[in-house]
């Protein structure tokens, strides 16, 4: 063999015993790494099923009547509760919030009797004025107006003060939306409800492990342990191999 | 010494306690307590920088190869734990839930590739910079030049995210406008890097690591204790927080726990926070995979990360420093999701309003009513994280400018003194460019940093991977591969900048989704590698001396 062909390095064609062993370790570890990260997520994708939250099921049962503006008191209350659940969620687009606020405001005023309506309208206007002027949220005037509006809105909706939804009802009412639930906003609400309340779930997301949803624990905690383990093993194995083969680096 | 320190502490404590009151607002003006902590930490950094400053170019570039395994691991971790890790990662999870974990996995999993495919071999190759390696391995002065320019671009891109973080924290602490905060913070980090060089930087990185991790962990223990979770190990205890977000926390389930704004510790059921690629987050399965892959290969191609392996004394130390470095990094990466999860519940009430995601770590501590001085320490930790990375990046960029461009291409006879002057001039120039870009606020910290990863993944990573593991990869193959990787990068970044300027280019939606600036390496890197292999196969062999060197020195 001439010198020109003698010196050649290829990961997949090792020419020495050490290189062969090193290649094998690397292949095994990179396979574990790839399956651990990407394999798991392909699996997560493969077995997931779109799963609705209970709030969507409740919403769907009353929506047709609410849309046709033919819902009874209980149906309207269920609608407002469902819409409030979505406005309180962690991710929500501004246009969807506006549409849901329209539905919440309209339904709240529909449920109120004539005396309550007047009181609600006055309290809402006073609150909005205060909100536009307030500099710090601990402002006493702002808090008292918010609390007054909340107390008035809780009556027709039959919300209790221990109910989380009662804590932000005041922020979802808008004085310009009291009389009409527009067709445009009805369409947006129809899109928004399933958009925010159907999730990709499976046995891997529903199983609890150390308090976590399992898949979350796997990615946020376990994978990092796996990476350290792989690195430790490779360094340990390489040192050991070099020692055994009397290779001095 | 005690005589000076004790009265100083006694005098300072009431001032700090009084000043703490000013730090309770989520935003607000100048905060004395956090400012004092920040100034004290910066003084410490500069002092260490002066004591261990670079005496010649060897010191400036590679710290005299005098750092231990654990020390080097700490320096790797500190160098790595940037504003993107400290502030940006929690921001990404706060803003997009499970999708943010792609960044956690991507930024740690890349170290596996770095270790098994690169670390030992890079140390054996014995070069100072990434461009040095590329120029020598591919026996091409033009590739060395391009490699140096890419290293500078990557450093600039990476620095932009850090300067955004520095700006946000200086804004929070000093109550300045964001733009002025970037200028002031940028000037301080520049002065510090110029004084210390890399030897100071390496020593400083070990101190910075300790400050970063302590400042990050203390509020977590307090918050998990306060809100009745398993506080002994918050990194596990927050599993219950995630489950609480998914299932909701009703008001009657908690006993008087409130955030600093007086809202109950409660949230409606929000499975979208934890469920994978939830439609409500606007993120998809493809994006999760593409980001993870791009960040992983980007990690193994970042010049300032690769450069750290030149500073360890032995090849075995290069490997073990990765193990230690990754462990130290993971301490922070296990913890960052805790801030986003607690921040989600604490800011769940619509009255809290929209918070700047990149400052959510600090806001979470504030909303959880952690003592303002500890919040100040946390903010100072964020600045330290950005500082430690920026100084490493500026040194890497300056090395590329002075060593690879000026000395190797423009003026090979430059004296060591002139080389050092050029390195410092390069540092100043880079800092000015970065400040100008950071002021534009082009994206979240984590996203801006991810651009640098994709750029490195498309350009440097394929050259190192094939350069080390396949002697058949030659100059022509490297050039062709670099052109393809560069082209993908240019297309993606052009569309990104055009989009930010409101310009709509053809196939805007397609490119914006499949070649987004945060993850274009998912396709750019494989294409670059493939092109390199194909062109190398059909062109002349790699010279004998290069192959001999690979066999005898790098793989022996």
Image (tube, coloured by chain):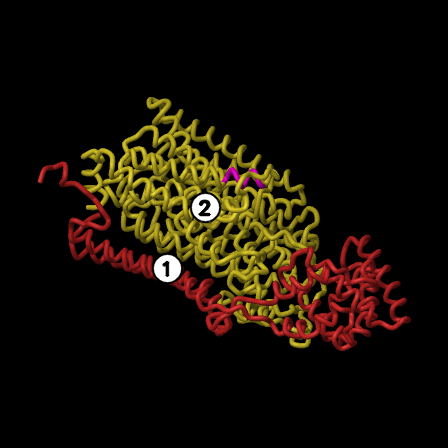
Residue B351 lies within the magenta run: no
Q: Position of residue A40 (x, y in %)?
A: 41, 64
Q: Give the label, 2 or 1, closer to the camera.
A: 2
- Relative to B134, residue B371 above or below: below
Q: Secondary structure at mark 1?
A: helix
Between B239 and B461, the one nearer to me in the picture: B461
Separation (CA) of disc 2 from disc 1: 27 Å
Disc assigned to residue A228: 1
Which residue is rendered at x = 47% and y = 62% of the image?
A220
A247 lies left or right of A143:
left
Residue A193 picture quarter: bottom right
**Closest to the observer: B159 or B144?**
B144
Whether marks 2 and 1 lie on the same chain: no
Residue at 24% of width from left, 49% of height from top? A11
Q: Using the image as rendered, state which of residue B124 and residue B149 is in the foreground.
A: B149
Q: How many marks?
A: 2
Residue A28 in percent (x, y) is at 28, 60
Prevailing secondary structure of the magenta residues: helix
Label 2: chain?
A: B
Q: Is residue B543 visible?
A: yes
Circle 1 Cα neighbour tier, 10 Å, few/some/many (<14 / 14–19 / ≥20): many
Q: Is B498 inside the magenta-drawn segment?
A: yes
Circles 2, 1 touching at the beta carbon (< 8 Å): no
The red one among the chains is A
Side of A100 where A222 appears, left or right = left
In the image, taking residue B215 as reference, residue B293 lies left or right, namely left
Residue extent of the magenta highlight: B493-499
Indicate the position of residue B216 as horizontal and vertical percent values: 53, 57
Q: Label 2: how many residues lie within 10 Å, few (<14), some (14-19) or many (20+)?
A: many
Numbered label attached to residue B520: 2
Mark 2 residue element:
loop
Q: Colour of chain B?
A: yellow
């Amino acid at each position: 063999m001439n010198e020109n062909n003698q010196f050649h390095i290829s990961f997949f064609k090792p020419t020495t015993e050490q290189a062969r062993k090193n290649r094998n370790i690397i292949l095994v570890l990179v396979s574990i790494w790839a399956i651990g990260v990407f394999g798991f997520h392909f699996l997560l994708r493969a077995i997931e099923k779109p799963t609705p939250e209970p709030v969507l099921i409740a919403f769907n049962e009353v929506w047709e009547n609410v849309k046709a503006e033919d819902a009874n008191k209980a149906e309207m209350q269920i609608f407002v509760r469902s819409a409030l659940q979505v406005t309180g969620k962690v991710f929500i687009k501004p246009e969807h919030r506006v549409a849901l606020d329209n539905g919440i405001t309209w339904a709240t005023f529909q449920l109120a009797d004539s005396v309550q309506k007047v009181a609600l309208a006055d309290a809402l206007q006073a609150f909005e004025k205060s909100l536009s002027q307030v500099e710090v949220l601990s402002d006493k005037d702002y808090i008292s107006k918010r609390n007054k509006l909340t107390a008035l809105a809780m009556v027709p909706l039959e919300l209790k003060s221990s109910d989380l939804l009662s804590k932000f009802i005041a922020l979802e009412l808008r004085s310009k939306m009291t009389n009409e639930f527009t067709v445009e906003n009805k369409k947006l609400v129809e899109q928004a409800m399933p958009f925010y309340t159907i999730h990709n779930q499976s046995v891997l997301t529903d199983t609890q492990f150390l308090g976590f949803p399992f898949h979350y624990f796997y990615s946020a905690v376990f994978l990092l342990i796996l990476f350290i383990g792989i690195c430790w093993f490779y360094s340990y194995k390489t040192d050991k191999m070099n020692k055994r083969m009397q290779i001095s680096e | 010494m005690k005589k000076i320190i004790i009265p100083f502490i006694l005098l300072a404590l009431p001032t700090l306690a009084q000043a703490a009151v000013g730090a309770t607002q989520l935003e607000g003006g100048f905060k004395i307590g956090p400012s004092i902590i920040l100034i004290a930490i910066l003084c410490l950094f500069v002092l260490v920088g002066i004591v261990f400053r670079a005496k010649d170019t060897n010191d400036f570039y590679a710290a005299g190869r005098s750092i231990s395994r654990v020390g080097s691991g700490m320096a790797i971790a500190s160098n790595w734990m940037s504003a993107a890790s400290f502030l940006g990662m929690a921001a990404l999870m706060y803003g997009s839930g499970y999708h943010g974990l792609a960044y956690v996995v991507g930024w740690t999993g890349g170290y596996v590739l770095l270790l098994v495919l690169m670390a030992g071999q890079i140390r054996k190759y014995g070069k100072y910079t990434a461009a040095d390696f590329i120029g020598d391995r591919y026996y091409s002065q033009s590739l060395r030049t391009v490699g140096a320019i890419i290293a500078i671009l990557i450093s600039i891109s990476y620095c932009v995210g850090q300067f955004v973080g520095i700006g946000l924290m200086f804004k929070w602490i000093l109550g300045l406008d964001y733009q002025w905060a970037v200028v002031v913070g940028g000037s301080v980090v520049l002065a510090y890097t110029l004084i210390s060089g890399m030897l100071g930087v390496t020593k400083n990185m070990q101190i910075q690591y300790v400050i970063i991790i302590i400042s990050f962990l203390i509020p977590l223990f307090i918050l998990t204790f306060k809100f009745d979770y398993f506080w002994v190990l918050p990194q596990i205890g927050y599993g219950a927080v995630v489950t609480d977000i998914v299932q909701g926390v009703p008001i009657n389930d908690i006993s008087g726990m409130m955030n600093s704004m007086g809202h109950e510790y409660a949230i409606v059921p929000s499975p979208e926070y934890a469920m994978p690629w939830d439609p409500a987050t606007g993120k998809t399965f493809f994006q999760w995979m593409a980001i993870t892959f791009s960040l992983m290969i980007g990690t193994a191609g970042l010049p300032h990360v690769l450069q750290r392996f030149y500073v360890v004394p032995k090849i075995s130390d290069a490997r073990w420093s990765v193990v230690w470095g990754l462990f130290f990094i993971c301490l922070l990466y296990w913890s960052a999701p805790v801030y986003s999860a607690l921040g989600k519940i604490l800011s769940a009430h619509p009255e809290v309003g929209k918070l700047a995601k990149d400052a959510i770590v600090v806001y979470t501590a504030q909303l959880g009513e952690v003592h303002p001085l500890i919040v100040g320490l946390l903010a100072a930790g964020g600045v330290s994280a950005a500082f430690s990375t920026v100084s490493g990046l500026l040194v890497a960029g300056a090395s590329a400018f002075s060593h690879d461009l000026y000395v190797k291409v423009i003026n090979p006879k430059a004296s060591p003194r002139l080389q050092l002057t050029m390195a410092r001039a390069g540092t100043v120039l880079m800092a000015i460019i970065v400040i100008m870009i950071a002021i534009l606020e082009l994206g979240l910290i984590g996203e801006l940093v991810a651009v640098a990863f994709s750029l490195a993944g498309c350009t440097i990573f394929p050259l190192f991977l094939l350069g080390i593991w396949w002697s058949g990869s030659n100059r022509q193959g490297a050039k062709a591969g670099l052109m393809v990787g560069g082209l993908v990068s240019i297309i993606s970044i052009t569309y990104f900048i055009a989009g930010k300027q409101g310009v709509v280019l053809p196939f805007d939606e397609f490119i914006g989704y499949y070649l987004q600036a945060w993850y274009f390496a998912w396709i750019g890197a494989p294409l670059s590698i493939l092109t390199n292999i194909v062109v190398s196969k059909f062109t002349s062999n790699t010279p004998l001396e290069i192959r001999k060197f690979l066999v005898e020195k790098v793989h022996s």
